[in-house]
Amino acid sequence: MVRQIAQTGTAVFTLVMALYAGTAGAHGKVAMEEDNCMRRIGENMIHLSTYQPQVNEEGHYCTEIPKAGNAILVIDLVDPALREMPIGVKVMKGSKAGEGDTITSLHPAMYQDGVISTQSPLEQGKYLVLITAEGVPPLNYEYHLRVEMINYAEVFRATIGPAVGLLLTTILGYKLIRSRRFRDWLATRRANKN
């Protein structure tokens, strides 16, 4: 009986840890194809990193910016062909092109080193980063930024593991208390105490 409880408890603990560990993902250790900061059009790829040294000196973000304030946007032109054509950058308030105020605008220029960097003051809300490459055909990349907003998908992913573990533990406890063996064992213990 005790052995079954220990085995079941170990199985539940292992399942909960596997689910919970799967929700924690560091941005820096994912493959390029799985990185949500990457944008690909055909063979051309770019990467956006956002930094807020006033919030976290070493942290970098992609689309979820933790606090309002100055943000440093760094765009890496991963594909060498993009370094040979003029690239323009525009940061706009809102989530659709042409609907919001332009916060920052960099006129098209060549970036031989493959790095575009700009600083923008971001208030709480949604922003759109438009990156245009004046090639043939022209390429357009978009990043939707959310500043100081709750990401309910991440909250759900972070809580699902512990919730499933609690549910399984509750079911296991209920089954154990309702089992005949447990009642017999409990009756034997009580009889031995008296």
Image: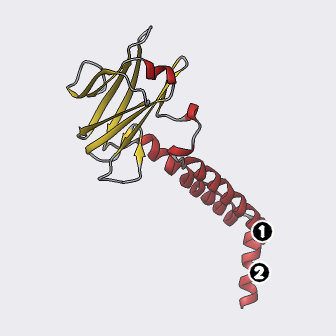
In the picture, residue 188 is in which quadrant?
Answer: bottom right
Q: Nearer the viewer, residue 185 or 3?
A: 3
Give whichever of 121, 193 is nearer the camera: 121
What's the amino acid at mark 2?
Thr
Disc 1 vs disc 2: Cβ atoms closer than 8 Å? no
Residue 181, numbered circle: 1
Q: Quadrant of the C terminus?
A: bottom right
Can the viewer see residue 1 in this picture?
no
What residue is drawn where x is 73% and y is 64%? 179
Mark 1 packing: few (<14 Cα in 10 Å), some, or many (20+)? few
State the residue at coordinates (39%, 24%).
Answer: 142
**Quadrant in which the N terminus is drawn:** bottom right
- Up the image or down, 178 lies above or below 145; here it is below
Q: Horizontal and vertical percent for residue 93?
A: 24, 29
- The mark that comes first in sequence, 1 or 2, is 1
The residue positioned farthest toward the left in the image shown: 101
